[in-house]
Every structure is written in structure tokens, then in C-alpha cells.
Amino acid sequence: MTKLKIGALPDDRPVKVNIELPASVHRDLVAYAAALVQDTGQPVTDPGKLIAPMLARFMATDRGFAKRRRLLHSPDVNAG
């Protein structure tokens, strides 16, 4: 059988996660949403919607995580 050039499509459906935040973190999240409204003029109806982009940004800029992720996905590691 011929091997296709692409493999399985990634599962990119949203995943619902329920978390508890310390009150101080929630207050800061609400304050961040208010600051974002002032800067962009776009209303933020649910400050919780900021959590995913904040986490994505944090992980994208974490050098240690990026290094480990590259090592895990390098061909040398997966060849075994």
C-alpha cells in the first residue's frame, strides 16, 4: 500500500476545562480585561476568554518549554 504524504489530521476541536482560580488571580484577570477594553475599545464580556490566549502566549515565549518540545519532536528521538 502507498504511504500518503499527510498523516492523520490533528484534533483541533476546543476542549472544555474547568479550573478554580485564586480570588487574587481572578481580580487580576478582570482588571486585565478592563485594561484591554481601554486599549482596544473592544468589549470583553467574559474575562475567562482571556485565559487560553494568555496560556498560549506564555507557552510560546517559554524558552525552556520550547527547547523540550523541540527535543520531543526531533526525528532522532522518534526514530527508535
Image (spheres, helix red, strand yellow):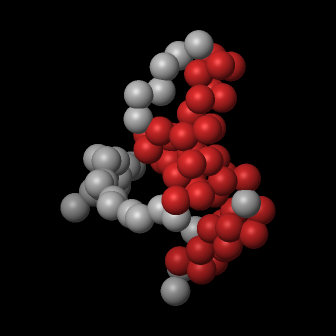
Q: Which quarter of the rendered picture does the N terminus lie within?
A: bottom left
Q: Is residue 34 above or below residue 7?
A: above
| Rendering coords of residue 23 (x, y %) | 52, 59
In the rendered picture of this protein, how many numbered marks are placed on residues? Answer: 0
Q: Is residue 57 above or below residue 38?
A: below
Does residue 49 appear to the left or right of 75 in the view shown?
left
Does residue 47 appear to the left or right of 72 in the view shown?
left
| Rendering coords of residue 43 (x, y %) | 48, 19
Question: Residue at (29%, 47%) from the top-left corner?
Answer: 13
Does residue 11 appear to the left or right of 48 in the view shown?
left
Question: Residue at (52%, 52%) from the top-left corner?
Answer: 26
Question: Residue at (62%, 47%) from the top-left corner?
Answer: 28
Question: Residue at (66%, 29%) from the top-left corner?
Answer: 35
- Residue nearest the viewer, comparing 62 with 44: 44
Farthest-out residue, right: 63
Residue 19 is at least partly visible in this image: yes
- Residue nearest the viewer, comparing 78 with 2: 78
| Rendering coords of residue 45 (x, y %) | 41, 28
Q: Is residue 68 above or below residue 35?
A: below
Residue 75 is at least partly visible in this image: no
Farthest-out residue, bottom: 80
| Rendering coords of residue 80 (x, y %) | 52, 86
Farthest-out residue, top: 41
Farthest-out residue, left: 1
